[in-house]
Image (cartoon, rainbow, N blue to C red):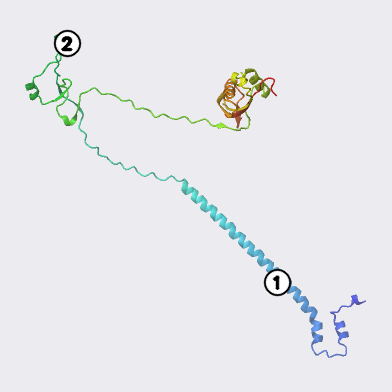
Amino acid sequence: MARDVDLSSKEWCDLVFEGKNKEFGAYELRTTSVKRHNKAVIYTIIGAILVVAAVFGFMKVQQIIAERTIADSAEQEEVLIDTSTEEEPEPEEQKVEIKQPEVLPEEVLNTVKVTELKIVEDEKVKSEDEIKSQDDLKQETTAFGQKDNDKGTDDRNVTRELKNEVVVEEKKPVVEEKKEEIFKSVEQMPTFPGGDAALMKYLSSHIQYPTMAQENNIQGKVIVQFVVTKTGAVGEVKVVRSVDKDLDREAVRVCKSLPKFVPGRQNGQPVSVWYTLPVTFKLQGAN
């Protein structure tokens, strides 16, 4: 029954304050509490709505400002792009006249042949070897040389002496060829035609056991490295683990005689690759 009682009703207040001083103030507060509560709820709702509206409005303003900023930036970029693509007028080339130093013309110098005096037989004397006297030479104003020449000039400042000129060929610089890169490992390593079994068979059938090694009972495994070029041929050969100089020499010889391999490949292209091969020397009947 207590659930049906409205504690905020006037009847309940009159029942509570029956026989009490209603003018004291508590009665009035009790009777008007419902209105105050309703007003408080309404004000709270209105305040919440105003706060939400203010926040939403602030966010909207920020969004508008951001959009305008982006638009302004885009316009500035377009302006910059337009100005950068404009062709700038090429500066006019200023022609500067360079005065070349005055060069005197080069001419062949006139010379008078001076014949060296030698005692020879009459038949060996050449007709053109005319001997000029000392008096004649003193009267000459031209230069002395190995032969007569009167088709030039007597001015020595603008002339060159008539002589046999030797043309020296300028040597062209030797251009060093770029050394081809040799790989140690590639995507597709070189392979012997027929596989490893065919390679071992080739070695066993072509190795000639050195006589000195046989007599001294020398045997073992020589590790050889050689380059399989991009054409498949065997290139440089070297011993990386030695047993005996005679065995080493025979292992190198056999490797150099190997037929062409299927070349290695890197990124789909044939390349030169180092290939390691153990060559075993074992005497028959040895454990």
What residue lies at 57% left-to-right and 21% top-to-bottom? 253
x and y, in percent, of residue 262 in the image = 62, 24
Distance from the alpha carbon under mark 2 to that under mark 1? 141 Å
How packed is label 2: few (under 14 Cα within 10 Å), some, or many (20 or more)? few
Up-down: is 127 above or below 240?
Answer: above
Assign a secondary structure to mark 1. Answer: helix
Identify whether 17 is placed above or below 255.
below
State the residue in front, 133 or 171: 133
Instruction: Work out whether residue 254 or residue 66 is closer to the camera in this orientation and state it.
Output: 254
Name the quadrant containing residue 248: top right
Q: Are marks 2 and 1 in contact (CB under 8 Å)?
A: no
Residue identifier under label 2: 124
- First of labels 2, 1 by sequence position: 1
Query: Callout 1, which amino acid?
Result: Gly
**Residue beneath disc 1:** 47
Q: Examine the rendered structure and indicate whether residue 168 appears above or below residue 78.
A: above
Kind of residue at disc 2: Lys
SS of the residue under disc 2: helix
